[in-house]
Amino acid sequence: MSAEAAQGLRDFVSRNGAPVVDEEHFRLLTGFNDIFVSIAATLILAALAWLGGMQSNTLGAVLVASASWGFAEYFTRRRRMALPSILLLQTFVLGVFVAAVSLLDVSDVFEWEGEELWFAASAALAAAAAYAHWVRFKVPITVAAGTVAATGTVLFLLLAVVPDLRNWGLPLAFVGGLVVFAQALRWDARDRERTTRRSDVAFWLHLSAAPLIVHPIFSALGLLESGGASLTHAGFAVGIYLVLAVVALVVDRRALLISALIYVLYAMSTLFEGAGAVSESFALTALVLGSALLLLSAAWHRVRALLVRRLPLSLQARLPVI
């Protein structure tokens, strides 16, 4: 398809629905064969991990990483299959990381102490593996995997230098999420019309950053504690979700809203229970929140345009077009 024909198609879609830039297109499936190949690859990789792990965890991880790269040579480089490419990238990077970490020969990741430098080296190796995979295959999710691994490297190095930071795990995760989010915005700024692979890269970066940002925020409000959250904290949680909605509209990405959904469901249920609707709290929450999200989806472009046009022109020039 020529560039003129492609632009004509985009203009047609924009006139007959939401603008292309607001649709967050990304390739997950090229056909049902993607699912078929992914299932088969998963079975083989699981078998290799099991059989290799009978000898050593390192061997199992190395077999998984090696097979993942080998499969990618055909299904990613030659066939350009979307879902298998995503799966194989993840298993390759994870295999490299696990292979390096498993050399420590420890049983419980949550009890590893005094080995932060080793974890930093393992994360750095995973980041290097992701970079090599990107150079070879150019799978959009690879940048997100490499960025998360590089961020983990820095965090582990900080823990090695300042061991007391172990008590600040959630704030560190939040800072790491902001770093990944900044990278996502940088990639978005390079493709404001979302017509190239850069937009797909930014999508996966946003998807990776969202839980790192959202989880520490709502954890700090006590939403994950066994005793439940107070009405005040639940109200704050709903307010924070509204702030996240504004951010999601401005940057034109829905990942933040989806990542925070389970937390705000719990918070709104608490509010309804406090108002006396104990038995119907979850149903009322689902009804209200679902209706709000559907309305937001229908009016996404108009609401976003109202918000973005009130921002400084210098900032508008870096955001996706409206």
Image (tube, rainbow, N blue to C red):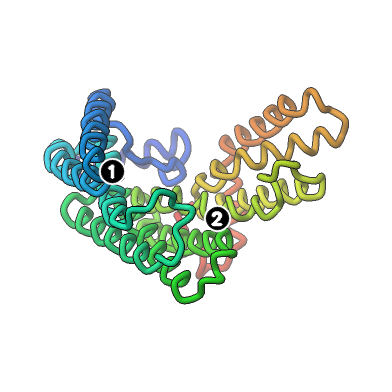
Name the image quarter holding residue 87.
top left
How many residues crowd mark 2 within 10 Å: few (<14), some (14–19), many (20+)?
Answer: many
Residue 156 lies, with reference to residue 87, above or below; the image says below
Q: Which residue, as the protein is rendered here, is positioned at the far right? A: 276
How much space separates mark 1 and mark 2, taking CA atoms? 24 Å
Between 88 and 257, the one nearer to me in the picture: 88
Location of residue 165 with respect to 105 vertically, above or below: below
User: Mark on residue 187?
Assistant: none
Relative placement, left or right, of 32 versus 79 is right
* Percent coordinates x, y for residue 100 in the rendering: 28, 56
Residue 265 image offset from top left, x and y in percent: 67, 36
Residue 9 in view here: yes
- Residue drawn where x is 21% and y is 31% of the image: 44
Q: In this view, does 131 lie to the left or right of 10?
A: left
Residue 43: give x, y in percent of width and height: 25, 28
Along the viewing direction, whichever of 314 and 271 lies nearer the viewer: 271
| Numbered circle sitting on residue 91 | 1
Q: Can residue 30 be seen in this view?
A: no
Secondary structure beneath dot 2 equals helix
Q: Residues within 10 Å of mark 1 (few under 14, many from 20)?
A: many
Local secondary structure at mark 1: helix
Picture quadrant of residue 54: top left
Residue at image position (51%, 51%) is 210
The amino acid type of the residue labelled 1 equals Thr
First in sequence: mark 1 vs mark 2: 1
Question: Residue 150: x and y, percent?
Answer: 36, 63
Q: Which of 150 and 116 is in front in this view?
A: 116
Q: Name the residue under label 2.
A: 213
Q: Which amino acid does label 2 sit on?
A: Ile
